[in-house]
Amino acid sequence: MNEILENILSYNEWLEIDTDPQTNQPLRYEVEKVFDENRVVSIKGTDFQFNYIKYSYDSLLSGQETNPIATERLKTTHGGFVIYTDGLRTQYLMDKARGPQSLRVLRKVNNSDKNKIIEAESFNINEEFFIWLLSRFMNDNKVLDDNNDLTISRIIGFKGEGNPNEKEAVLSGSGNEVMNLISSISFLIEMQSMTEIEVRVVIEDETYEIRYFSRNSQIDIMVENYSGQFMLDVREEKVSKILLKAFIEIIPSMMNSFNEDVENGEWTNNSKRDFTLALVDSVRNKLDSMYGLENE
């Protein structure tokens, strides 16, 4: 990793400088690492070295080279990413959605535009996983991993596509149980497919909020809603540790729990239908109980 960092930071030696045709000045290109010495975090018994890279650079917009207005002529790309290693392999966690833009940034700052040696990796996020999470929460089967006490604390919200418009629903871990059930039934019946879900999980004494998207299997970690042992660290160190633990331990544990249920036959192609019908029965029983008590 240190060799990669050295290459990234010594861009003056390899960067092909582009010039702004309107000012004849070189286009701005800035990259810096936040920590002079790499930081270390222990996850699942393994020490990971990491650093945080900030980048900001300008590029000419195609077709706007002769435009005298700089804001219309130039595009600024900026952000940050975590670079980390377990001693065997170096990887990156970007602040942008998975896809061409992230790869383009990483290849540019690594001077690997030509050989394309950096490739994207992702989890397979789909509707079945969303409904499985919802089912585990609603059925009070919230423990996803006994080894690290990973538990679903709350389904913060979920969205789906249907006719004629998108619909959004929110479930609370507390409050009116009947309304939660009715909200879930309405959503599952009306929507053609679920497109995203946001879930709060607890692992030991830490709380994470994670938003999953079916599109591009994108995953967002809601860093600002984190609580736990990293809260007092400086911002870039806190962000790095939260992302590392989420992507190295928490998300793989959640995906593994889902895959195990599929392999064991506990979650099948009929599970969405069975889950929806079970919700209907639950609402009926709750209402019968409520009105039965009132009529006595």
Image (cartoon, helix red, strand yellow):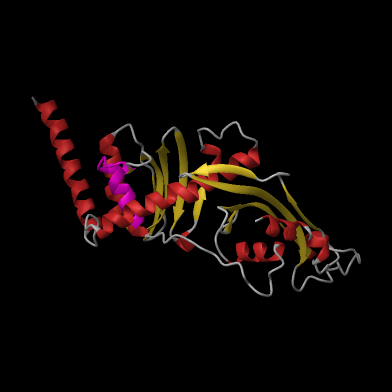
Give the left or right position of residue 263, taking residue 249 as reference: left
Give the left or right position of residue 188, taking residue 243 as reference: left
Instruction: Give me the residue at 49% from left, 53% from top.
Output: 219
295 relative to 210, above or below: above
Q: Position of residue 163 (x, y in %)?
A: 36, 61
Instruction: Give me the residue at 75% from left, 51% from top.
Output: 32
Instruction: Give me the residue at 72% from left, 54% from top.
Output: 55
Residue 147 within the segment the image draws in magenta: no
Residue 136 within the segment the image draws in magenta: yes
User: Residue lying furthest top in this view?
Assistant: 296
Question: Which span is picked out in magenta?
Answer: 129-144
Q: Nearer the viewer, residue 229 or 218?
A: 229
177 relative to 15, above or below: above
Give the left or right position of residue 49, taking residue 159 as reference: right
User: The C terminus lies in which quarter of the figure?
Assistant: top left
Q: Position of residue 37 (x, y in %)?
A: 70, 44
Q: Position of residue 182 (x, y in %)?
A: 27, 43
Instruction: Give me the residue at 29% from left, 33% from top.
Output: 176
Give the left or right position of residue 103, taking residue 147 as reference: right
